[in-house]
Image (spheres, rainbow, N blue to C red):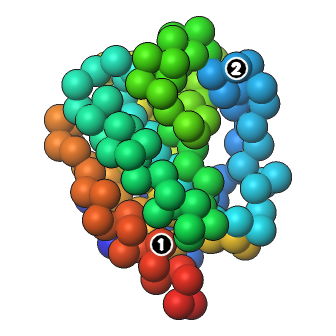
Amino acid sequence: MTATLAVAGQTVPAVGELAPDFELVNQFGEPVRLSTLRGQNVVLVFYPFAFSGVCTGELCEIRDNLAAFEDARATVLAVSVDSKFSLRAYAEKESYGFDLLADFWPHGAVASAYGVFDPESGMAGRGTFIIDAAGTIRYVVVNPRGQARELAEYQDALAGLEQA
């Protein structure tokens, strides 16, 4: 699948392109660099804000099905513009077993690199990028504000990586 929209003239990286590298801190303040995860699949999930309804529903669905991602040798990285402090409280409240990354400063820089930052609202959009073990983007979807993504689509895309 391909991206359904781009925000404010930004370009969403396409399937087949090398994923833009980045380093952000997780909810514990630990640095996470995308390029150090080569050799495994990565599911990069941008979401607007911690503690919001649709975002919580999406991330809890991932949490409840984390074994399916692990079976596909995929690391889940969830990215928002929230601070690491709010992400830690959010992760603890919802018992997330994956990294929540803070794209806090420079505000939305990584979301911008992936074409999903909305500068008018100051938030990341709902973009998902599945990146293969070589660092190549294999699946992209960007949903409009308020529209949740489908977990089944992630699972289908990951299954396709296993067959490739």
Q: For the N terminus, which image quadrant? A: bottom left
According to the picture, the residue beneath numbered tag 1 turns out to be: 158
Q: Is residue 36 visible?
A: yes
How dense is the environment of label 2, judged by Cα within 10 Å: few (below 14), some, or many (20 and up)?
some
Q: Which x, y percent locates residue 31?
A: 78, 30
Q: Amino acid at mark 2?
A: Phe
Q: Is residue 98 left or right of residue 115?
A: right
From what the image shows, is residue 20 above or below residue 78? below
- Farthest residue to the bottom: give it: 163
Residue drawn 76% across the image and 56% down it = 37
SS assignment at label 1: helix
Per the image, label 2 sits on a secondary structure element best described as: loop
Q: Which residue lies at the image location 72% right of the left edge and 49% below the top edge?
A: 34
Residue 87 at x, y percent in the picture: 53, 18
Quarter where residue 10 is shown: top left
Percent across and percent down for residue 26 are 66, 27
User: In the drawing, what numbered circle is on residue 9?
Assistant: none
The x and y percentages for residue 3 are 34, 61
What amino acid type is highlighted by mark number 1? Leu
Query: Which residue is pictured at 56% across the width and 68% down the height?
Result: 71
Mark closest to the chain's N terminus, 1 or 2: 2
Quarter of the image where the C terminus is located? bottom right
Residue sitting at x 60%, y 30%: 101
Q: CA distance from mark 1 to mark 2?
A: 28 Å
Q: Is residue 130 left or right of residue 51?
A: right
Depth check, front residue: 8 or 43: 43
95 on left or right of 23: left
How dense is the environment of label 1, judged by Cα within 10 Å: few (below 14), some, or many (20 and up)? many
Give residue 28's mark: 2
